[in-house]
Amino acid sequence: MTRSTRRTINSGLFLGLMGIVCLALSDEYKPDFQPNYRPVTDSDEGGLWYVIDKQEEQVKTSPHRIRDPELNRYIHDLVCDLSGEYCSGIRVYIMKNPHFNASMAPNGMMQVWSGLFLRLSNEAELAAVLGHEIAHYLRAHTIKRWRTIRETGALAVWLDVGLGLVTGVHGLASLGLMSGAMAYNRGQEEEADRYGLQLLVDHRYAPEAPAQLWHTLEIEREADQSKSSSSFFFATHPDIEDRAEYLEQQARVLTKPEIDYLGRSHEAYVERVTPYYYAFMQNHLELQEYEQTESLLKLHRELGYPAHLTDHFSGELYRLRNLEGDQERALESYQAAVESPQSLAVTHKNFGYMLMKQKQSQLAREQFQLYLDKNPSATDAEMIRFYLQTLESS
Amino acid sequence: MKRILPLLILGICLTACVPAYTLVPEGKTTSNGYEVVLESEWNKAPEMLKPGPRTEMWTKDGVELNQLLFVSQLDAGESLFHSRSRELPMPKFAADMLPNDVIDFVKTSFKNLYGGEISIQAGHLRPQSFGQTPGYRFQLDFFTPSGLAKRGDVLATIKNDQLYLMVFVAARMHYYDRDQPEIEKLFSTVTF
């Protein structure tokens, strides 16, 4: 037996054993407290809740909050389904923020960022993220972390910077500061992963979803080498490969072939998110992280998002990046997007502008006219009519 | 004399180190190559506080509450504001930009000025002469990271492959509405 074969067998055995141990452990996860728990005010935990309750007031009225009733209801119902009798203690806030994240505060304030939806492939992956956050909550990870940090003297930073950022009151944080102060420790992340998976399986959601999501994120990270350090998510969750591996291992152990698991359909998820897709992607494009946007668009095409939307954003990406050859690429993408009967008015407009730049006056006029036909009350209608006249005489 | 000397040096240092705004009185005046007639007094920001290379900045009550930027002769490849971060470089002007590109150029420049932590809505694009040159104007709306709502008006044109901009940004609460009529008049009477 060669050394490498022996190593392979050893690691296989190790992983196998790990799987059995994990299964045993996962069955034992229980919440740390009773439903509707609230700490007494003069305890350290009561003090922490007091501070976070105040932050929550700001989140509630934040201009970045997404109030769409249907999306809020959908997430709320999913959270309630996963958290069962603990649902009444959790309040969900969907925030407009193109980064990938969801967070959970110890008082039951959960935040889901719009950027999360852009990375998911199906409802099971969404349930996986929510389950992970619910697990942090049920195991009271924040108060445990707070007690550790208090002993290190970093508490003021944790409260001022950490909580402010995670609650979103400082706007669309770039979140470089987050990594040290606010992150759960590695053990807590792993526990939330495993407990989250347990919640997922208990509710018949596809067990492979968490590991699949990590793989998707890894692909995005690879596409975005230049800026990975500034990404909040990757700064606080450094061990993607490790986590994907143990989650995959545990999912294999938990999967039962006779069960028809929920949430695997890409189509159902895409249909659910499509009404919000334009706003969420527009917000992501504003990050100017074009490799990342390109990688997301590739994922969205594979998932089957409507082509007139993905083509529109490819056009926008190339127009804004404006490197050598990008104007031609933008023209091709806009052309593909306007061929759909569902094409967006704004695609016709930006296609028209790009054609005008290329001195294709007649084609530009056609697109501008289509823009006005599709959006007669546009606030820039006067500008477009001005160009229609200018192009006619040119 | 020995006792006075350090005080004198300190005095010189303080006057030299503290950037001073200069009063711009009512009436006819020039700013960065533009000629305007003012109905009220403004304050011109000192050189070291200018946000960009081709920019003059005025304010009435402090730049966080209201500011008026005069940008002139911005060449292709130049940025509206000085870059503050290598990870978030300022976008560069291109001479072939059309109104949709200029809107994104201005939006992204402001976003990056705030470290990327704001999201700006732009709208109400319409034609408007800028001095003797055909131009256009549009509106900006955003919240600062601390939650202050701001609104801006931008007048823009490209002449001889160079970008000219007048940008007014003020807090939505009280300041924008108070100063808007004056800005309206400035936009329609400016010459360069």
Image (cartoon, coloured by chain):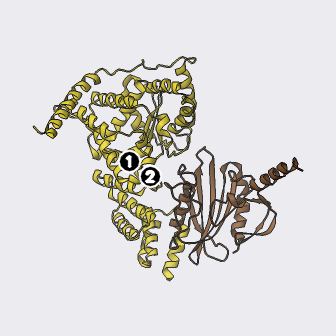
Chain colours: A yellow, B brown
| Disc 2 crowd, CA 10 A, few/some/many (<14, 14-19, 20+) | many
> Residue A217: x percent and y percent?
34, 45
Residue wearing tag 1: A118
Q: Residue at x 73, y 54 (%)?
A: B178
Question: Closer to the camera, A37 or A374?
Answer: A37
Q: Which mark is residue A47?
A: none
- Asked whether residue A98 appears in the rendered view, the answer is no
Q: Circle 2 sits in a helix, a strand or a loop, which is it?
A: helix
Q: Residue at x 32, y 55 (%)?
A: A298
Q: Circle 1 sits in a helix, a strand or a loop, which is it?
A: helix
Q: Residue at x 63, y 57 (%)?
A: B152
Q: Chain of mark 1?
A: A
The answer to whether residue A174 is above or below residue A346 is: above
Do the residues bearing badges 1 and 2 touch, measured as CB atoms within 8 Å?
yes
> Residue A182: x percent and y percent?
48, 34
The answer to whether residue B168 is above or below residue A15 is: below
Is residue A6 left or right of A177 when viewed as pictured? Answer: left
Is residue A346 left or right of A253 when viewed as pictured? Answer: right
Quadrant in which the C terminus of chain B is drawn: bottom right
Could you tell me the amino acid type at mark 1? Leu
> Residue B99: x percent and y percent?
53, 68
Residue wearing tag 2: A284
Q: Chain of mark 2?
A: A
Whole-Å distance between the Cαs marked 1 and 2? 9 Å
The answer to whether residue B135 is above or below residue A280 is: below
Is residue B17 left or right of A119 when viewed as pictured? Answer: right
Could you tell me the amino acid type at mark 2? His
Residue that lies at the very extreme toward the left in this rendered image: A1
- Asked whether residue A375 appears in the rendered view, the answer is yes
